Image (cartoon, rainbow, N blue to C red):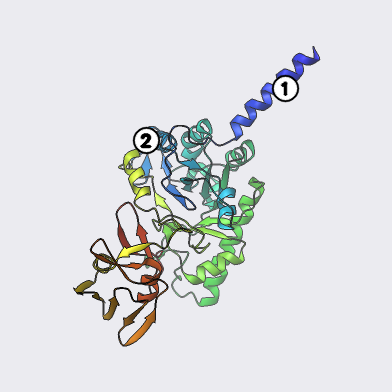
Amino acid sequence: MYKRIAISILVSLIGLTLLLTPLQAKKSETIYYQDQVAVLMYHHIHDKDTSSSTITSALFQSQLETLLSKGYHFISLDEFKKYMAGATVPSNAVLVTFDDGYQSFYTSAYPILKSLRIPAVNFVITTDLAAPLASYIPSMSKEQLSEMTHATNFIDIGCHTDNLHHKNPDGQAALVGKLDGENDEAYRQRVSADAQACVSKLAPLTDAPLDTMAYPYGIVSPEATELVAKAGIRYAFTISPEMATRGDDLMLLPRINAGSPNITPELLLRSIQRRVLAQPNSAPLRVDAAAAAVQLGGSATADGGELRLRLGQEAFTLQVNAKTATRGDARVRLQQPVLREHGQITIALDDLQALIGQPLVYTPATGKVAARVTPSVK
């Protein structure tokens, strides 16, 4: 009898472990990227409501199942934080995030996430917790949030401000813009109090640290960042559509939109893959210098082993086999020599960034160089 009871308990524990363990990809072993994370952004999952930030539950599930089948690995917020601190993540890592704390997350998204054992974090507007059904789009209750965070080890919550998810009369986002007649000190007190209120309202609903937020509309300013950090926020997400890496500012983390109705699973795959950054810790990445100049909005002129670039008002000259270049009248030392490869004059991407004084992003899937996108700042 005791043996049968022990077996029954063991089976139950195995079932619970499966419930609480995020699924890993089963079918594809393709590695699209390593040591970076695609942070996806969603808002509203609903089968009747329509908007530019609303998708059906069928589309949401299809997106996730497609990513799983293609070898993507979903990670939790805790794993993401550890990665940013130096830990490794699986290849093709993805973090799922939601904004606004809508009730549809609990009724539509959560069952899908739970069935697929995919982690997610929802950034909540905490003023709505007082009357969650009074919002234009109903919000989750405290009880629903607490249930999810305590019933699994992979649903997290974070701040989306307490009551600053709106625009001021002058059109500026309330988090960054001053009210009419508001002085600097009053603005700082208002934003600080809001951040503290958001943290204090959510803290009792989770056992995890409450140190993460998403900026409303993705709009932020250096002063707002400083103020929310003083309230205990250590990680903050924008809507800058790039891959997340350890080189990112923890208070200006990028996200890729996945929550629009036109984003099919195939489009989402392409959206991620075209943003993949060159793999770190590999041989120095080299790019076609002339093509890069044109892609950055400039021009290039070749004359034998010399390549002259112009970007805005700046002029640069590269010489094949040289480890120096010129910027205007100044000579700049390069870490790697300029080379002629397959008929093209190439330069190490790190050297190009240093030469022109601008952070760059190279996307292997498209072979394009672009200036690194910065979040909206007002």
Instruction: Describe the element under mark 2 as helix, strand or loop.
Output: helix
Q: Which of the 4 quarters of the picture holds residue 289?
A: bottom left
**Which numbered circle lies on residue 9?**
1
Few, some or many residues within 10 Å of mark 1 (<14, 14–19, 20+): few
Residue projecting furthest to the bottom: 329
Q: Is residue 215 above or below residue 43?
A: below
Residue in the image at 52% along x and 67% along y: 225
Query: Mark 2 is on which residue type?
Result: Leu
Spatial distance from mark 1 to mark 2, Cα to Cα?
37 Å
Q: Secondary structure at mark 1?
A: helix
Residue beneath disc 2: 59
The quadrant the C terminus occupies is bottom left
The location of residue 49, given as percent across then percent down, is 36, 38
Judge left or right: residue 189 versus residue 52.
right
Query: In which image quadrant can residue 232 be found?
Result: bottom right
Amino acid type indicated by mark 1: Ile
Mark 2 nearby-residue class (10 Å; few <14, some 14–19, many ≥20):
some
| Nearest to the observer: residue 289 or residue 62 | 289
Q: Is residue 327 above or below residue 362?
A: below
Who's the residue at 60% across and 58% down the image? 197
Say whether disc 1 or disc 2 marks the residue closer to the N-terminus: 1
Q: x, y (%) of residue 176?
A: 46, 67
